[in-house]
Amino acid sequence: MVFNVGEQNSLANQFLAELRDKVIQLDRDRFRNNLERLGEIMAYEISKKLSYRQLEVETPLGTSKMNLPESNPILIAILRAALPYLNGFQNYFNKSDVGFIGAFRKKKSGEVSIKLDYAAAPDLTDKQVILIDPMLATGNSLLDSVRELTTRGTPAHLHIAALVAAPEGIAHLEKI
């Protein structure tokens, strides 16, 4: 299922517009701040899809029943521009374990390929995992990352958080 924040009327559209604006992109501090803000918004949106359980909380006025997440998702950032975006997720999922995947584009004879050269993640078996990558172009680096991550266990659910996604990348992922 694809959830497109940009199709909703929200403040996220202002941050997305600034992120994509070719003049504003030159302001690196603003660019990083918008990535972090959008990470927070995406963390909130994804939190709606997590599993919850009802717990009792002792308040000054008595006991209150609250629905709280069953567990903290594991955050995995694909390193390129993902660090400020990851910071936004960590602001909301501040008790989550974090992992990283190092990926970069390699040009050879006019063709572009993706090379993964580093992966660090905890055991993902039966965990909620959020894979954080600001840009989904072809979907190839994302699929390579998922293949690498599944060597560390099969997650209960994998959420993919991309800020900008090419239609070709979305179509490629939907085929799988």
Image (cartoon, rainbow, N blue to C red):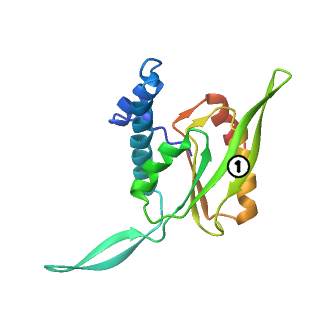
Does residue 48 appear anywhere in the picture? no
Does residue 165 appear anywhere in the picture? yes
- Residue placed at 58% from the left, 43% from the top? 133
In depth, the one of 33 and 42 nearer the eye is: 33
- Image coordinates of residue 165 in percent, x first then y, are 58, 33
- Residue placed at 44% from the left, 21% from the top? 21
- In the rendered view, tell whether residue 122 sits above or below residue 140: below
Neighbour class for label 1 at 10 Å: few (<14), some, many (≥20)?
many
- Residue placed at 60% from the left, 60% from the top? 157
The three-letter code of the residue at mark 1 reads Ser
In depth, the one of 168 and 102 nearer the eye is: 102
Quarter that holds the C terminus: top right
- Image coordinates of residue 79 in percent, x first then y, are 62, 44
Q: Which residue is mark 1?
A: 145
Instruction: State which quadrant residue 128 falls in.
Output: bottom right
- Image coordinates of residue 24 in percent, x first then y, are 41, 22
